[in-house]
Amino acid sequence: MHSAAQASNGYEGDITMPHTRSASSQNAFFSPQSAFYSPSSQQTIPTNQVASSMELLSNNPFFNVGIKAVGDSMKDITGKTVNMLPNEMKKSLSSIKDYFAVDQIYVMKKLSLLLFPFRPRNWSVGYSADGPVPPRVDTNAPDYYIPLMSVMTYVLVAGLVLGTQNRFTPEQLGMHASSALVWNIIEIGLLCLTFYILNIQSKLRTLDLIAYCGYKYVGMIAALSSYLATHSLFVYRCSLLYVSISLSYFLIKCLRLKILPDTSGSHTYNANGNARRVYLLLAIVLIQPLFIWYLTRHLIVT
């Protein structure tokens, strides 16, 4: 037994065991972070090599032909997809871009018209052979640029107001944007349903209705900005009252030409039809101040 132990000790002394790699180094090799993002395992490609490779690709005629073929195929697929749509849908999609045909002069004039609409003017929308003229030609034409920018500005101003009250969180921006989108969808859906139920045919298109209902965010920004500058509840209420009156006046002047019957006698309606049109016009006009108050009241500290 003693000799066996000595033999064992001698055996252990003669043989040198190989050093095994630590578990941490093995895990580091197989870790996704270390394998793809670790500086030790990631080879650095010289900048001049990348530039030369890109230059070779750009000068390769086969590469350019392939890029052109892919672009042409995408255009062909897009064109076929558009051609498969119904004619009314294609017409609507093509007319949406006209609502963004604005310039700086139009935006300034339209904002001043929304906030100060009480001076006498001609409220009729100009028409060409293809339909209504683009907004940059006629200030009375509805557009999508001001409503879209107003919604984004409303979300930012709401976050600024909450920040002055130490109530701001990043999630508030998404909540206000989602709330504005949902309420717009509900509003437009209910108004279109009302048009359908009452069987009212008018010159007011759904795309125009979306634009007119989006102008209320200009008044909301004005009301919130007045409160942000003064932190006065009285100033906010006065601003809310003024922008509600100005927006209602603006909508009555614009929508009455599209919803109410034509006074020239080209279209005739009975008394009940005229009453329904008046009630619908009043509903569209009066619901806008309610939305302005509802979407701004939670930001005001009483």
Image: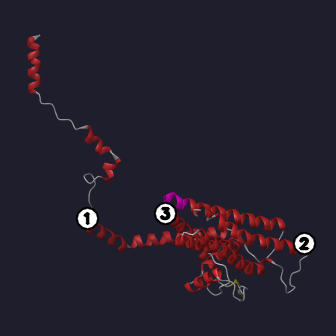
* Left or right of residue 41: residue 298: right
Q: Is residue 247 visible?
A: yes
Front residue of 232/24: it is 232
Furthest toward the right, the residue is 270
The quadrant of the image that shows the C terminus is bottom right
Figure quadrant of residue 104: bottom right
Q: Give the label on residue 163, or none.
A: 3
Residue 36 position in % (x across, y down): 33, 52
Foreground disc of the pair 2, 1: 2
| Labels 3 and 2 touching (C-beta < 8 A) | no
Give the spatial CA distance, label 1 vs label 3.
Answer: 46 Å
Figure quadrant of residue 217: bottom right
Is residue 181 highlighted in magenta? no
User: Label 2's element?
Assistant: helix
Which range of residues does the magenta coloring cover?
A: 163-174
Residue drawn at x 26%, y 37% as measured from the top left: 23
Front residue of 17/116: it is 116
Which residue in the structure is indicated by mark 1? 46
User: Label 3's element?
Assistant: helix
Residue drawn at x 74%, y 81% as measured from the top left: 253
Is residue 167 highlighted in magenta? yes
Which amino acid is tagged 2? Asn
Residue 276 position in % (x across, y down): 85, 71
| Labels 1 and 3 touching (C-beta < 8 A) | no
**Among the two numbered marks 1 and 3 on one chain, the one whose residue lies closer to the N terminus:** 1
Which residue in the structure is indicated by mark 2? 272
